[in-house]
Amino acid sequence: MAVMLLTIITYVALVIYCAWKVFISLELKEQEKIFQESARSQRLVEQRESLHLEKMLFENEALEILTLYEIMKEISQSLSEKEAFEIFQKKLSAHVVFQECLLVHPLSDEINDYKKSPEYFLFPLQGRGGRIGFLVVRGLAQEDRDKFIILGHQFALALRRIKLYQEIERIAITDSLTELHTRRYTTERFQEELSRAKARGMKLSFMMIDVDYFKNFNDQHGHLAGDQILCEVARLIRENIREIDIAGRFGGEEFCVVLPDTDRTGARYAAERIRQAVDRAVIKAYDTEVKITVSLGVATYPEDGAALEEFVDKADWALYRAKREGRNRVCSFGIYD
């Protein structure tokens, strides 16, 4: 009986032990599932956070690209270096922390001083033909340097475009031989100044200049020497007029000068200054040194008319009167010395 009781107790204990083992195993499996689900959930959370971070980075990059596009779009609408730089400074201050930003010419004496100072950051602006300037910025935060460099490259592109446009414009309005203005551009500016003189009640004079005996020089020394003579006369004209005066090549060996805010006396004085400068000059035309003279005719608003064509005709008439009277002289329309 005791043996039987012991057997029953042993069996019951064995059943309980096996049940406990099964329970423990099931509990471990459940815990493993819970752990796996927890790990999976954690990975999903991490992936979600990573995707959110990537989304934020992408949005920031897109915003920076859009900002760059907007900056370049606005700068590109300007054809003036000064205006483009003012726009660049305004946009830069909205995205970068700095105290001062300057646009400095590459040959400026101040560049070396800026390079020696640790408070200045210099960004070189490169053009196709070399360096076209420096962006000099003071007080630039270290964390903003990469952004500034990106914006600097974009500004350099805009600056190159502006300089290219200016060069094309300069070529379009400049006589290729003498580097004076073309007849068309000079005429356009003459009309503008004439309209301004009429509106403001101001004086305006127009001067025609012709190289004396130019055909003889061409026949004697050749066309290359003749071209050199024209270049030297153009240089002497440029050196003996004001910055506001407009000098152009009228055609062949004829030149013209528009003299804003200049009466007849002032125009005759300016013409005489040019005549004397040419008369004193010894022009070296390749292997030949020559002395030349010019004749000049002057017409003045409002005494000599009110229309552009009228001024050209009267200045031309005065010029040919100077030729008839012996050349190397100045004649004003309607004035007989």
Image (cartoon, rainbow, N blue to C red):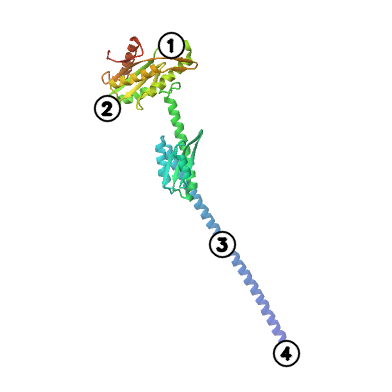
Labelled disc at residue 215 = 1
Q: Is residue 251 above or below residue 66?
A: above
Residue marked by disc 3: 42
Horizontal relation, residue 64 to residue 276: left or right = right
**Mark positioned earlier in the residue sequence (3 or 2):** 3
- Quarter where residue 244 is shown: top left
CB contact under 8 Å: marks 3 and 4 = no
- Quarter where residue 90 is shown: top left
Name the residue rendered at 71%, 86% in the picture. Answer: 6
Q: Nearer the viewer, mark 1 or mark 3?
A: 1
Mark 2: which amino acid?
Ala
Q: Secondary structure at mark 2?
A: helix
Q: Is residue 213 above or below residue 194?
A: above
Inter-mark Cα distance, 3 to 2: 81 Å
**Mark positioned earlier in the residue sequence (3 or 4):** 4
- Quarter where residue 248 is shown: top left
- For residue 115, say whether it is visible: yes
Q: Is residue 275 above or below residue 77?
A: above
Q: Position of residue 18 (x, y in %)?
A: 68, 77
